[in-house]
């Protein structure tokens, strides 16, 4: 089960084990729309920007849907089970592999980001839009062994995924949340 709130904060989308997807109107507190998915999804996320697209994850598949009618737009197939996902403005959904939304192909992948399972990904965005887009290519990842690492997405795309910073929380992490860069 998973839930994602629309960027407008007026709606949320949820998926459950029964292969159902539901759109909830948060203003009225009622379900607005529901449909059955072909496979049960474990993760759902709204895309960047105005929220015109959302992503669902089923095992190794990332499926891009239109927010209006939930129809499938693209499908990205990874080689391993997707454990977490974060929408990124420069490509599309980011998991342990990232896909190009125009072609539907995997754009790049980093296999050995952590020695244990990756439990959370966050795309660190700029606080102001006046900063260049190159400064928003930072990704933070967290693993179940307590390690948080910061990456430069441009280096991942060039198959040189060396982390820029690392912190050991000495705790078992289950998720990761991020904020704007200073």
Image (tube, rainbow, N blue to C red):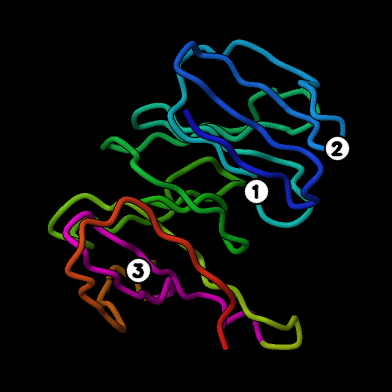
Q: Position of residue 112 (x, y in %)?
A: 18, 59
The residue tagged 3 is 156
Nearer to us of marks 3 and 1 is 1
143 in magenta? yes
Which residue is nearer to you in this view: 4 or 152? 4
Q: Are marks 3 and 1 in contact (CB under 8 Å)?
A: no
Q: Position of residue 56 (x, y in %)?
A: 53, 32
Sequence order check, earlier mark of 3 and 2: 2
Q: Which quadrant of the rendered structure holds the C terminus? A: bottom right
- The label nearer to you, 1 versus 2, is 2
Q: Residue at x 40, y 50 (%)?
A: 95
Residue 79 versus residue 120 in the image, above or below: above
Q: Which residues are magenta?
A: 132-154
Residue 168: quadrant of the picture? bottom left
- For label 3, the crowd category at 10 Å Cα-Cα, with few meaning under 14, some 14 to 19 and many 20 or more, is some
Q: Which mark is residue 27?
A: 2
Mark 1 — residue? 47
Q: What is the distance, in whole Å, between disc 3 and disc 2 at their CAs?
A: 40 Å
The answer to whether 89 appears left or right of 67 in the picture is left
Asked whether the residues under the numbered discs 3 and 2 touch, taking CB atoms below 8 Å apart as contact, a structural biologist would say no
Tag in front: 3 or 2: 2
Give the secondary structure at mark 1: loop
Q: Earlier in the sequence, mark 1 or mark 2?
A: 2
> Which numbered disc, 3 or 1, marks the residue that appears first in the sequence?
1
Q: Position of residue 15 (x, y in %)?
A: 55, 25
Displayed quadrant of residue 31: top right
Distance Cα–Cα, label 3 vs label 1: 21 Å
- At numbered mark 3, what does the secondary structure look like: helix, strand or loop? helix
């Amino acid at each position: 089960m998973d839930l994602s709130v629309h960027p407008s904060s007026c709606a949320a989308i949820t998926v459950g084990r029964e292969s159902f997807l539901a759109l909830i109107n948060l203003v009225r507190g009622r379900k607005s729309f529901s449909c059955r998915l072909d496979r049960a999804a474990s993760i759902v996320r709204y895309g960047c920007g105005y929220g015109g697209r959302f992503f669902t994850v089923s095992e190794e598949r990332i499926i891009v849907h239109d927010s209006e009618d939930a129809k499938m737009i693209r499908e990205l197939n990874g080689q391993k089970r997707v454990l977490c996902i974060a929408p990124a403005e420069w490509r599309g959904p980011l998991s342990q592999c990232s896909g190009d939304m125009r072609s539907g192909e995997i754009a790049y992948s980093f296999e050995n980001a952590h020695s244990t399972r990756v439990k959370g990904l966050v795309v660190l965005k700029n606080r102001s839009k006046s900063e260049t887009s190159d400064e928003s290519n930072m990704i933070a990842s967290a693993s179940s062994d307590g390690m948080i690492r910061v990456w430069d997405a441009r280096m991942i795309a060039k198959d040189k995924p060396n982390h820029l910073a690392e912190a050991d929380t000495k705790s078992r992490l289950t998720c990761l949340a991020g904020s704007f860069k200073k």
